[in-house]
Image: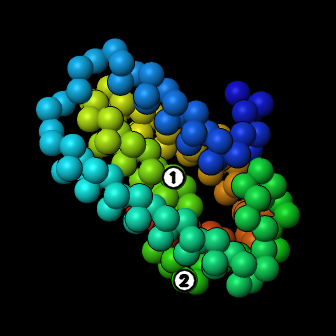
Amino acid sequence: MTSLELKIPPPLVALLFALFMWLASWLVPPVEAPFGVRLGVAIVLVIAGVGLGLAGVVSFRRVRTTINPTTPAATSSLVSSGIYRFTRNPMYVGLALYLLAWAVLLSNVLSLLFVPVFVGYINRFQINPEERSLMALFGAEYTAYKAAVRRWL
């Protein structure tokens, strides 16, 4: 299954999952919840996702390293400041929050199940290969960083 590693950009993966969630929402009746409440919760989740994602991009830009998730070997610096003091993958956490917001808006339990599947996919086909590259590039420094900061939250 290594043929999928680092091949599909994570934002595209998230869009595909959002489509699957929407399609799945037609299979099971929605949970009865007022639209205003669902919308409010979804907006809060999206704002949190945008904040995390932008914080990650800003941290990468500050040290002038690549944000291209398909080429981790092109990384020029190990980023461990800013939002990266709290999570090793703020941009992926942001994408997961967008999908969670979408599930809340859809008000559908089946759609919600796609969020942990997305996390599993990103762990296996994106983060694990990225971590192998970062380990090769930064060795003990990256090992220490991994020990100090959680992968997600």
User: Which residue is found at the position 30% from the left and 43% from the top?
Assistant: 104
From what the image shows, is residue 82 above or below residue 126? below
User: Which residue is found at the position 74% from the left and 83% from the top?
Assistant: 63
User: Which residue is found at the position 57% from the left and 39% from the top?
Assistant: 15
User: Which residue is found at the position 34% from the left and 58% from the top?
Assistant: 43
The three-letter amino acid code for the residue at tag 2 is Gly
Quarter in which the N terminus is drawn: top right
Instruction: Residue under label 1, please give it.
Output: 95
Whole-percent x, y for residue 99 in the image: 44, 45
The three-letter amino acid code for the residue at tag 1 is Leu
Whole-percent x, y for residue 130 in the image: 70, 55
Q: Give the residue at the far front of this rendering.
A: 36
Q: Which is nearer the eye, 7 or 130?
A: 7
What's the distance in space between the residues labelled 2 and 1, CA to CA?
19 Å
Tell me which colouring the rendered structure shows. rainbow
Image quarter for residue 45? bottom left
The answer to whether any part of residue 39 appears in the image is yes
Which numbered disc flags the more N-terminal residue, 2 or 1? 2
Q: Which is in the foreground here, disc 2 or disc 1?
A: 1
Element type where label 1 sits in the image: helix
Instruction: Residue under label 2, please give it.
Output: 82
Q: Which is nearer the eye, 144 or 119?
A: 119
Locate residue 106 relative to residue 91 in the image: left or right: left
